[in-house]
Image: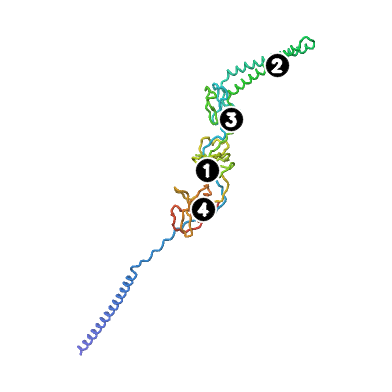
Amino acid sequence: MGMNVESGIQSDYAAYDYDDVQARRRRRIVIGIAVAVLIGVIAATMMFFGGKKPAPAAPAAPGVTVIVPGSASVDATVSATGSLFAKREMPVGVAGEGGMVQSVLVEPGSWVGAGQTLAVIERSVQTEQANSLAASVRVARADAQLAQAELDRAKALVARGFISKADIDRRTATRDAAAARVAVAQAQYGQQRATIGRLIIRSPAAGLVLTRAVEPGQVVGPGNGALFRVAKGGEMELRAQLAEQDIARIRVGNGAEVTPIGSKRAFNGTVWQISPVIVPQTRQGVARVQLAYDPALRPGGFASVVIKSGTTQAPMLPESAVLNDEKSAYVYVVGPDNKVVRRDVKVGDVSDAGVVILSGIQGNEKIVLSAGAFLNPGDKVTPQLSAAPTR
């Protein structure tokens, strides 16, 4: 009996083990099938999509700041360079026979008045000659007085019959000859005094002494040329070399600003003469700008000039928008397709307010404000509009 119970229990355990093994086996098969299906799906997906790569996203166009400058009334100017000269340079030399220089009374840079003595030539011989001629004048006058007195006495006696009319005529002729000798002596004396006066070298007009080419003890004469050079009124001028097309834009009376090289100070002047001739070799002419006296203006110096030639309607751009290369000045314009296009321009006056553009743009374009040096024609950009610069 006991053996049967044990055998029943063993048989129950055996049945239980068999069912559990079968269940685990079925789960493994199901899991294996699911894994195989998943692997198959993945493999099929990879086979189907493996040859196609997704297209990379297009890079965003760089953003640039642009302005629409418009146009406004600006001062039209012509810029040039040239040399400074005295407007009216007066060479002063020996006008008479000359001689040894006794004294020199001025130095270069001195301001002199009209008729002021610049130098004196030794004149002792001429002075003695003048004294002799002065004595001759006195002698001639005495003779003339004596002749007049004799004539007067003769006229008193002619009525009494003591003197004939012929004697009166002779005495009258003697009186007239004496008077003529007085005139001759006075003329000779005046000539000698003028000769002495020419031995004093004087300034013909008020002005600035520019050069001095004489020293005391030097023997000078008419062949020595200019001993002094004087700028009349101290006025200077700039002789500006201008291209033919620029000459046509200016007029006599236009204002100008002259800046000597090495100086930051500008001097106001006026165009007073425009050359009627264009030099064929250079296609240039000369505009002469007059300047008031100032110690800082030195003849022979080099200077730049900006001549105001009226007003014009033109766009104005900040300096950052204008680029330059070996060809010309240019700007970048953003077109309707947001691509940059190079536009060559002609630059006018440059000031703190900006750069005047004389030609190349109308003013209604979108101009790259900055970063133009990092762009190339055809680059696509994202324009960001900025306000036009104030004037």
The mark closer to the camera, 2 or 4, is 2
Label 4 to label 3: alpha-carbon separation: 55 Å
The mark closer to the camera, 4 or 1, is 1
The mark closer to the camera, 3 or 2, is 2
Label 3 to label 2: alpha-carbon separation: 48 Å
* Amino acid type assigned to the residue bearing label 1 in the image: Glu
* Amino acid type assigned to the residue bearing label 4 in the image: Ile
The residue labelled by disc 1 is 244
The residue labelled by disc 2 is 176
Q: In the structure shown, which secondary structural element does the residue marked by tag 3 occupy?
A: strand
Quadrant where the image shows the N terminus: bottom left
Q: In the depicted view, which residue is nearer to us: 225 or 113?
A: 225
State the image coordinates of residue 205 (x, y, percent, origin top left): 60, 30
Which callout, 3 or 2, points at the residue further toward the start of the chain?
Answer: 3
Label 1 to label 2: alpha-carbon separation: 71 Å
Label 4 to label 1: alpha-carbon separation: 24 Å
* Amino acid type assigned to the residue bearing label 2 in the image: Asp
The residue labelled by disc 3 is 112
Q: In the structure shown, which secondary structural element does the residue marked by tag 1 occupy?
A: helix
Residue 139 occupies quadrant: top right
User: In the figure, 325 relative to 61: above or below?
Assistant: above
The residue labelled by disc 4 is 361
Q: In the structure shown, which secondary structural element does the residue marked by tag 4 occupy?
A: loop
The mark closer to the camera, 4 or 3, is 4
